[in-house]
Amino acid sequence: MTPNHPSQAPATEIERLVAELDKAELYEQRLRQLIVDVKDQLAAGNHEKALSMLNGALNEIDSATDVVVPKK
């Protein structure tokens, strides 16, 4: 039977969800920092470096499907 109320969820499930939210928050912070860093590189005229940073981020995003879909 599926719990209908959060207080009915097993503690381990709540801990798993909290850990997942923590990971998602760290991921968001890393992406926000990347945006700041890329903007800095563009402002400094380092277009190639900015493009390289964005390509690296896209590669990481493509490789990190477990952020969206947990591994089974």
Image (cartoon, grey):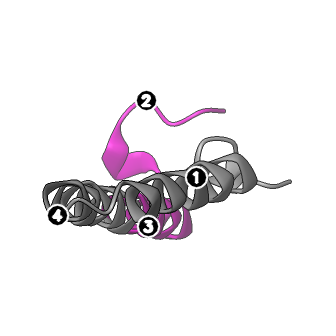
Secondary structure beneath dot 2 equals loop
On whether residue 71 falls in the magenta region, the answer is no
- Place of residue 28 in the rendered image (x, y in percent of width and height, measured from the top left): 32, 56
Q: CA distance from mark 3 to mark 1?
A: 22 Å
Residue in front for this viewpoint, 57 or 17: 57
Q: Count residues near mark 1 (Cα–Cα under 10 Å), then give few for <14, some for 14-19, many for 20+.
A: few
Identify the main secondary structure in magenta. Answer: helix
Magenta region, residue range: 1-25
Location of mark 2 (residue): 4
The disc, 3 or 4, on the residue closer to the chain's N-terminal end is 3
The disc, 2 or 3, on the residue closer to the chain's N-terminal end is 2
Q: Is residue 11 left or right of residue 26?
A: right
Q: Is residue 72 left or right of residue 60?
A: right
Camera-nearest label, 3 or 1: 1
Residue under the image location 18 percent in, 60 percent down? 36
The amino acid beneath tag 3 is Lys
Q: CA distance from mark 4 to mark 1?
A: 16 Å
- Place of residue 64 in the rendered image (x, y in percent of width and height, measured from the top left): 67, 56
Q: Is residue 44 left or right of residue 6?
A: left
Instruction: Please tell me the numbered disc located at residue 55.
Output: 1
Instruction: Please tell me the numbered disc located at residue 23.
Output: 3
Residue under the image location 46 percent in, 58 percent down? 48
Instruction: Please tell me the numbered disc located at residue 40.
Output: 4
Q: Are marks 4 and 2 in contact (CB under 8 Å)?
A: no
The disc, 4 or 2, on the residue closer to the chain's N-terminal end is 2
Q: Residue furthest right?
A: 72
Residue in front for this viewpoint, 3 or 25: 25
Camera-nearest label, 2 or 1: 1
